Image (cartoon, helix red, strand yellow):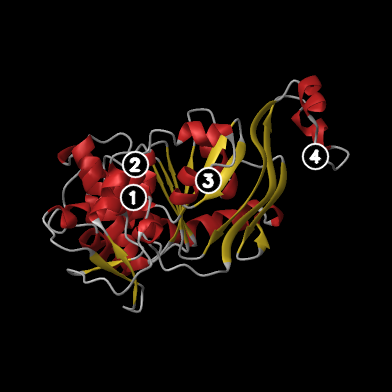
Amino acid sequence: MTSIVSSAPKLSCRSVWRLYGPRGGDVFRNGTAPDEAALASSEVIVAVRDVSLAVNEGEIFVIMGLSGSGKSTLVRCMSRLVEPSAGEILFNGRNLLAASPREMIEIRRHRMGMVFQHFALLPHLSVLGNVGFPLEVQGVPRAAREKRAREMVELVGLAGREADYPHQLSGGQQQRVGIARSLAVEPELWFLDEPFSALDPLIRREMQDEFIRLQDSLHKTIVFITHDFDEAIRLADRIAIMKDGRIEQTGTPEDLVMRPATPYVAEFTRDVPKAKVLTVATIMAPDVSVAAEGEVPAGVRIAAVASRLREATAPLAVVDADGRRVGTLTRAAVADVMLGG
C-alpha cells in the first residue's frame, strides 16, 4: 500500500525507555542511559529499550514483534497511556512528556484516535451512541455529534445499523464501530493495536480492505501494531521490527526482506514470499524498446501482476508515476521470483 506521505515527522521518539520495577527510577538518576550491568543490578524489567524513530505525516507505520517484544508498551508510551521512564515523545515538534495530565487528556480526546484488539463497545449504547460517545465526552451538542456519528457509520459501511446494539453485530461489524468511534474526533494521529487479530481470517481480510479504502480517502498518520507479516506487507509504508524492547530495524517491507540488518530480522522475514514484497521495479529489465502487451506501474508488487503474464504473449511495459516507460517486465523474471529465485 502507498500512502500520501509528507517528509515532516508527525511523531518522533528519541531514546525512549520504559522500565518496570521498584528501582526503575534509580537507573536514570545520573541522566545517562544505563548499561547492561546497571540494568541487571537494578532488578528492573526493560519493556522498551532506547527506541528512536520517526513517523511521517500521512504514513502507515507498522510496528511488529513477537509477544513480549514491547510493541504495545511502546505505542502506549507514544500517547502517554504508559509513562516513559526516559526519553522524549515529540508530537508536531512538542515534547509530550512536558505536557500536564490535563493537557494530555485534551490531546488524546481531540487529536489522537485509538483502536485496540478488544473493541470495548458500550453494550447499553446503540451503534450511533457508541460512535458519538467521544464527542459527547467533549461536550459537543447532540445534533452535531449525531450528524458526525452518522457520517462515520456510513464511512465504515454500516449505514442502516445505527440503532443496533453491539450484541446484534458480528465481530467484524463491531470492529467497524470501534474504527468509526475513533475517527469521530477527526484525529491527527491514529493508533491501532492489533485491531483485526481477534477476527476470523476472511473477516480479517475484509477489514484490511476496508482499512486500505479508509486510508485512501482520509490520509491519516497511522501507527499500526501487528504480529502478522502478511498484514504488515499489505498495509505498511514502513515497518519497525522489535525484539526485547529494542528496534532491530526500520524500513520498507522490501528493505527488511532483501536487506536485513540483523540475524534476527533475517530469521523473522525468512519465510516471507518475495513476490509479495518485491516491486516490479526491482526485477524489470531496463530496455524500453521491447514490444509490450500492456503497462504495469513500477511500484506495484510482483504477486499482484503475476497473473497478467500467465496468458500474455509479450512482456509488460513498466511505467513510472508520470506514465513514462522505464523498463520491461518479462514472464521469466516473474517466474524466477515466484519459484524462489
Dot 1 falls on a residue whose secondary structure is helix
Q: Nearer the viewer, residue 28 or 137?
A: 28
Quarter location, residue 170 = top left
User: Label 4 vs label 3: CA separation?
Assistant: 29 Å
Q: Amino acid at mark 2?
A: Asp
Label number found at residue 256: none
Report the side of 206 relative to 130 (left or right).
Answer: left
Of mark 4 and mark 1, the one earlier in the sequence is: 4
Disc 1 and disc 2 in contact, CB within 8 angstroms: yes
Q: Amino acid at mark 4?
A: Ala
Disc 4 and disc 3 in contact, CB within 8 angstroms: no
User: Label 1 vs label 2: CA separation?
Assistant: 6 Å
Label number found at residue 230: 2
> Which residue is rendered at x = 80% and y = 39% of the image?
33
User: Label 2 vs label 3: CA separation?
Assistant: 18 Å
Q: Which residue is mark 4?
A: 33
Of mark 4 and mark 2, the one earlier in the sequence is: 4
Q: Amino acid at mark 1?
A: Arg
Q: What quarter of the picture does the C terminus occupy?
A: top left
